[in-house]
Amino acid sequence: MGCFCAVPEEFYCEVLLLDESKLTLTTQQQGIKKSTKGAIVLDHVFRHTNLVEIDYFGLRYCDRSHQTYWLDPAKTLAEHKELINTGPPYTLYFGIKFYAEDPCKLKEEITRYQFFLQVKQDVLQGRLPCPINIAAQLGAYAIQSELGDYDPYKHTTGYVSEYRFVPDQKEELEEAIERIHKTLM
């Protein structure tokens, strides 16, 4: 006779990536089960994002009271009781766990891009305070990376307002970003 208290092995999880896309991990598609170690889940994410410099990154999750935890690669998913109590479905958040002391020493472009996305997200969500002059400079760089060099035929007044860089973004900041963007090449 089987035990009625057994925990089902089925697992369905969405990983929210820094570029705001989602990676779905399931028992059926990737063979992820509750008995799978966190390191295996991380490996799936690293392969999906093409990351080689993996030591800086991790997966977070929130319990029902919104307390945040890092997924321990050495533990099984079932051993993360706070995670298991939230689902299914389960939600994990991919992010920077440790910042590089000198980002210029990062070897891979994709690693630098992930760092950029994390800093952009942290500034936007207010977790990383940013003076307005620095926010304008960073915003201009982000606009240039997204839209290219300033082109008066393509970039009409107010084009920056389509983007969000800081909480409670004001028109003055958007105008400063436009002014700086015009100078970047």
Image (cartoon, grey):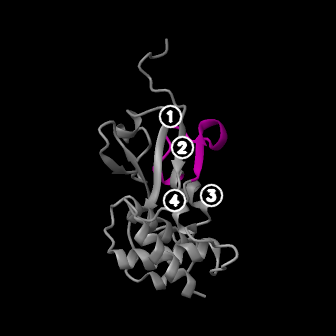
As measured in the structure, the alpha-carbon distance from the residue carrying label 2 to the one carrying label 1 is: 8 Å
Q: Which residue is mark 1?
A: 89
**Residue at 63% in and 81% down:** 149
Q: Nearer the viewer, mark 4 or mark 2?
A: 4
Q: Are marks 4 and 2 in contact (CB under 8 Å)?
A: no
Q: Which residue is mark 2?
A: 14
Q: Amino acid at mark 3?
A: His
Q: Nearer the viewer, residue 56 or 123?
A: 123
Q: Which residue is mark 3?
A: 48
Q: Are marks 4 and 3 in contact (CB under 8 Å)?
A: no
Figure check: 83 above or below 179: above
> Which segment is the magenta one?
21-40
As measured in the structure, the alpha-carbon distance from the residue carrying label 4 to the one carrying label 1 is: 20 Å
Is 58 one of the magenta-colored residues?
no
Q: Nearer the viewer, residue 159 or 101?
A: 159
> What kind of element bears circle 1?
loop
Total labels drawn: 4
Q: Position of residue 118 (x, y in %)?
A: 45, 65
As measured in the structure, the alpha-carbon distance from the residue carrying label 2 to the one carrying label 3 is: 13 Å
> What kind of element bears circle 2?
strand
Q: Which residue is mark 4?
A: 18
What's the mark number on residue 174?
none
